[in-house]
Image (cartoon, rainbow, N blue to C red):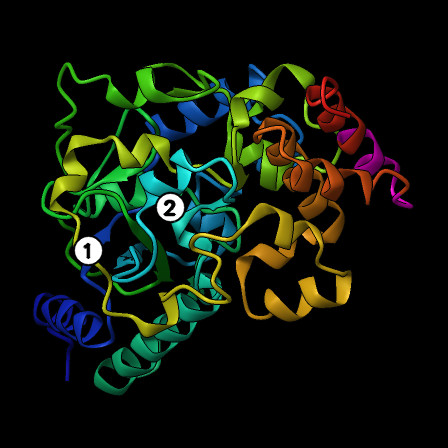
Amino acid sequence: MSTDFTKLAADIKRWGQALGFQQVGIADTRLEEAEVHLMTWLDAGHHGEMEYMARHGSKRSRPEELQPGTLRVISARMDYLPPSGADPESVLADASLGYISRYALGRDYHKVLRRRLQKLAQRIGEAAGPFNYRAFADSAPVLEKALAQKAGLGWIGKHTNLINQHAGSWFFLGELYTDLPLPVDTPAHNHCGTCRACIDVCPTQAIIGPYRLDARRCISYLTIELRGPIPVEFRPLIGNRIYGCDDCQLFCPWNRFALPTGERDFSPRADLDAPQLVELFAWSEEKFLQRTEGSAIRRIGYECWLRNIAVALGNAPSTPSNIAALQARADHPSALVREHVQWALAQHVTLC
């Protein structure tokens, strides 16, 4: 019996929503325009030390090279904005607190999405018989935003994040590469218009033009991807952001349509939605590993964790407790930590 792929595509979208995805779409594998954009970005060096962005050659923009036989990409999105916890703008306004990007407050999204995608693939196999597929959740060389736009899930905004007209941008993306010849969806249209809120609000002016991000200036890159010293010129601009940055999303007008997630896995853990910087800086490595177990935060490691908090404390008020916290780490075994602590203490030199 032949497979009705039109019906199967409709079923896949329905099954995906039943598994917790807010939307599922289907795209072909042609990404010529996105490939040109990627190569231009890499040639300009805007990826900084993210060597992995260039490591896989054309596999990132040609799905059939990454997973032979791929004809279609099933793209899915899942909301992550926590329904509870401290207000993001209030945390950013309080220099005694550390700001952690909202996506990282709960369980590591890689695990959550990959597990759901595997369940979706299993359901497809039960209906259509054996098929070839591979699941991805920000875990391989995949141009997930370009594919999601082709699948109708949203458009790539001027800040280079994906925006959905009815749901904003607070969501994760995941993909199933498959050899099933499913009908494709209509790509989403761009609705950014003349708005430049994300460009204007970026603390480090990392969005150097519409749809052009210089990652080397981006706070998310500086606090998560960069493993060495944070350039001195950016340290005062980081403020109290110790893991990632959400400013371009917080001030995007489309996010007035964003809804809180229903996924309990994405609820804030370990009181990290509004943590005291001094308390975080006192964590031992053992406590860091314990409190970030199952979290995306753990990937930066304890050393970079202390580096980031030291910068935030350097930008915090010159209170005795902040200065004492920094002085307690002045002789830390890590040269990276010591250098950032010394910089931070120099910001409070009048009271030291």
Instruction: Identify the image quadrant of the N terminus.
Output: bottom left
Q: In the rendered image, which residue does mark 1 sit on?
A: 25
What residue is at 9 percent from the left and 46 percent from the top? 166
Q: Position of residue 115 (x, y in %)?
A: 41, 75
Q: Of the residues shown, which amino acid type is indicated by label 1? A: Gly
Compare marks 1 and 2 and give the one earlier in the sequence.
1
Instruction: Identify the image quadrant of the C terminus.
Output: top right
19 lies left or right of 144: left
Q: Which residues are magenta?
A: 332-340
What residue is at 27 percent from the left and 87 percent from the top? 126
Label 2 residue SS: helix
Q: Of the residues shown, which amino acid type is indicated by label 2? A: Glu
Between residue 16 and residue 81, name the one nearer to us: 81
Mark identifier at residue 144: 2
Between residue 141 and residue 197, name the one nearer to us: 197
192 lies left or right of 248: left
